[in-house]
Image (tube, coloured by chain):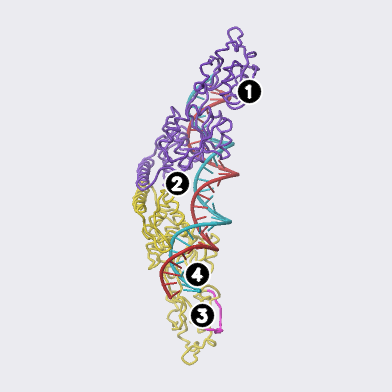
Chain colours: A purple, B yellow, C red, D cyan
Amino acid sequence: MDMDSLKLFRHLAESLHFGRTSRACHVTPSALTRTIQRIEAEVGERLFDRDNRSVRLTKAGEALKQYAEETIERWKELKNSLAGDTTLHGDISLYCSVTAAYGILPGILGRFRKDCPEVQIKLQTGDAAQGLTRLKNGEVEVIIDALPDKEASGLEFMPITETPLVFIAPLAFPETVIHDGPEIDWRKTPVIMAEQGLSRERLDRWFAAKKIQPNIYAQVAGNEAIIAMVSLGCGVGVVPLLVLEKSPLQEQITVLDISPRLAPFSLGVCTVKKNLRNPKILAFWEISARKTPNHEKNAAGNLRG
Amino acid sequence: MDMDSLKLFRHLAESLHFGRTSRACHVTPSALTRTIQRIEAEVGERLFDRDNRSVRLTKAGEALKQYAEETIERWKELKNSLAGDTTLHGDISLYCSVTAAYGILPGILGRFRKDCPEVQIKLQTGDAAQGLTRLKNGEVEVIIDALPDKEASGLEFMPITETPLVFIAPLAFPETVIHDGPEIDWRKTPVIMAEQGLSRERLDRWFAAKKIQPNIYAQVAGNEAIIAMVSLGCGVGVVPLLVLEKSPLQEQITVLDISPRLAPFSLGVCTVKKNLRNPKILAFWEISARKTPNHEKNAAGNLRG
DNA sequence: CAGACATGTTGCGATTTCTGCAATACAATA
DNA sequence: TATTGTATTGCAGAAATCGCAACATGTCTG
C-alpha cells in the first residue's frame, strides 16, 4: 500500500467515477483500474461494487476510505511539520503563443509568482505552431496556447478559457467587403489568412464546408500582422477576439457577424503527463487550474502532494 | 511512501543498525540503504545521522517513527477487521534431510500445523545433499537441513539448533579401534565415511589437517547406514549426535572423545529469498524462528504481514 | 433499431523502478 | 599493517507499472 494508490482510492471513493478520477489525477483509466485491483487484492476484499454503469463503495471500501483519509491527512501534517523548507526552488520553462500571452498568461503568472516566488520562470513566446514541437522535444516543460482539436497521446491539457474566432474588417475601408445582395461575396472579398496553425485550419474547413474557393489576398504569420493588414484595407481576416481586444488598432477594426460562426479557440495549458510528477510543474498546473470556470475545476488536485 | 518502506524504516529506527535490519527483514543492505534514501528524499529531511560507525535517529526520524508506528498499526487493524478469511490456504513444499527430520522437524511442523491448519505440507525426505539442488530448481520451497558452511547467494538461512559431529565406535567390538600408545592410530583404524556431503567434507578436512591418510573401510550413503556398519564392527564412523541419539542401535555404540573436535552441524531452515514474499512461506519461516535460541530471534518479523 | 457514445476492463509492449551482487570507502581493532 | 565490520554506490538484470489499443457492455439518439 502506498500513498499514491491511497490518494487515487480516496478520490474514487468520493467521485465514484473512474473516468473523472483518472482525469483529475492525471492517470489513464487503465492505471486507475489496476491500482484499485491491486488494493483489492492486497486487502482481500472488493472495495467497489461496480459495473459499466455505476460504482458504489462496499463496506470494506467505507472502512478503507476512513483509513485513507486519516493516513493521508496525518502524512500531510507530518510533512508540513518537519519540512524545513517546503518552498519550491529552481526554474520552470514555459512556451507561450502570442495569442495566449494576451489572454491567460498574466493571470496565471501572477498567481504562480505569488505562490511560488522562488521558482524562476523561463518564458519564451512565439508562434503557436511551435509549441507542441518544443514540448515534445523537451525544450520546454509547459506550453500555454490554443489547444489542438484532437488530443495527442501522452499529453495533458487544461482548457482555461475560450475566445471566439472572429472575422474582422477595416472600419475605414468599408468597400473591402464585397457584397452579393445581403450576403458577403466570399469569392471576391479578399481574405488575409494565417500562414498555418489552428486558425488557418479552421478557416480552411469553414470555406470547404461552404464549398467556396476564397480570394486569398495574403498569407501572413501572426495575428498582429493580420490585424495590421486588415486595418489597412487589404482584406478581411480572422483572429481570436482576445487578440483584437488587446490590439492598439482595435478602433480601426469592425467585427463581422458571419454565420456559421467559427468554432472558438480554446486557450489553455498543456504539458506531457510525465512532467506532472515534477512538483514545480504540478504546482504550476494547479495554480493554472484555479480559475478554470467549468473544467474539472475542483477535480484536479493534491494527488501528489 | 508505502507500507514495506515504512516497516523497514520502523525496524531500523528500533535497531539503529542497517545490517541487522536488513537481515531481519530479508532484504540486502543495499536495498535498505536505498529505501531509507528514498524516504529521506520524499520528506526532504535526513532521518538518520549515520556514518560507518553509528546510526542515530534525527528529529525528523523521531517524528516519522511515530507516524510509522501509528500507520502500520492502523493498517493491521484494518486488515484484521475487514478480512473475511485471513487464514492461509494452499500448500507448501518442504524437503528435509533425514538428519534434520530427527532433530527439528517435529517441533516446527507441530507449531506450523497448529498455526496454519489449512496449509497442506508436502514433505519429502532424503539425502541432505539433494536439498539445495531441489531448492534452486524450484522443486521445493523450503529445505530443512544442515546448513552449508558458506552462504550461497540469493538464499536465506535460519539456524535452528546445532548438534555435534561425533566419532563413534562399536561397543561390542572394541578391537576395531586400533591404538598407538594412548592415541588412536588413524592410519590403521578402519573408517566408515559418508560418500559425500557436509560431514564428509568436514572429515576430509580433519584428516588433512592431521596430515593423515585414513584407512577407509567403506563409503556409504546415509547416517543410518554408517551407524549400522559401525555397530557391526566394520570400523569407526562420524555422525551427527542427534542421529545417533534417535537410533535404535544407540546402545551398541560408544562415542569417542577425539580432539580436535569436528565443527558441529548447524541445522536449520533454508529457502530462496524471493520465496519469503509468499505469505505461507513467510509464516512457515517465522514459525520456524520462534524457538531459535540466539539467532535473530525477535528480529525476524512482520515485515510483510 | 442501428449507430454513436460512455464506461470500466484487459492484453501487450515499453518504460520506469527496484533489487541484488560486487566493489568501494571508511573507521575501529588486532 | 592487515582485518573486520559497516554503510554506500555502480551496474545489470528482474519486477512492477503504465499507456495505448482493443474490447465488452450498457445508454442515448436520430
Residue picked out by circle 4: B148
Spatial CA distance of label 1 from label 2 is 60 Å
Query: Is disc 4 in contact with disc 2, using a CB cutoff of under 8 Å?
Result: no
Label 4 – label 2 distance at C-alpha: 38 Å
Q: Are marks 2 and 3 in contact (CB under 8 Å)?
A: no
Q: Is residue B88 left or right of residue B199?
A: left
Task: Tell me residue B29's x, y (percent).
Answer: 46, 60
Mark nearest the camera among 2 and 3 is 3
Q: Which residue is mark 3?
A: B206
The local crowd at label 1, few if under 14, some if 14 to 19, many if 20 or more residues have their Cα within 10 Å, is some
Q: Of the residues shown, which amino acid type is indicated by label 3? A: Trp
- Which chain does tag 4 point to? B
Q: Nearer the viewer, residue B27 or B84?
A: B27
Picture quarter with the C terminus of chain A: top left
Q: What kind of residue is marked 1?
A: Gln
For label 4, the crowd category at 10 Å Cα-Cα, with few meaning under 14, some 14 to 19 and many 20 or more, is some
Q: Amino acid at mark 4?
A: Pro
Image mark for residue A219: 1
Query: SS for tag 1?
Result: strand
- Could you classify mark 2 by the number of other residues whose Cα lies within 10 Å: few (under 14), some (14-19), or many (20 or more)? few
The part of the chain drawn in magenta is: B206-221
The secondary structure type at the circle numbered 3 is helix
**Considering the numbered disc 4 on the image, is that residue within a helix, a strand or a loop?**
loop
Image location (x, y in percent) of residue B72: 37, 51
| Observer-nearest of B293 and A131 | A131
The residue that mark 2 highlights is A41
> How far is mark 1 from mark 3, CA to CA?
97 Å
Q: In 3D space, how far apart are the residues under numbered discs 2 and 3 (Cα atoms)? A: 54 Å
For marks 4 and 1, give the CA distance.
83 Å
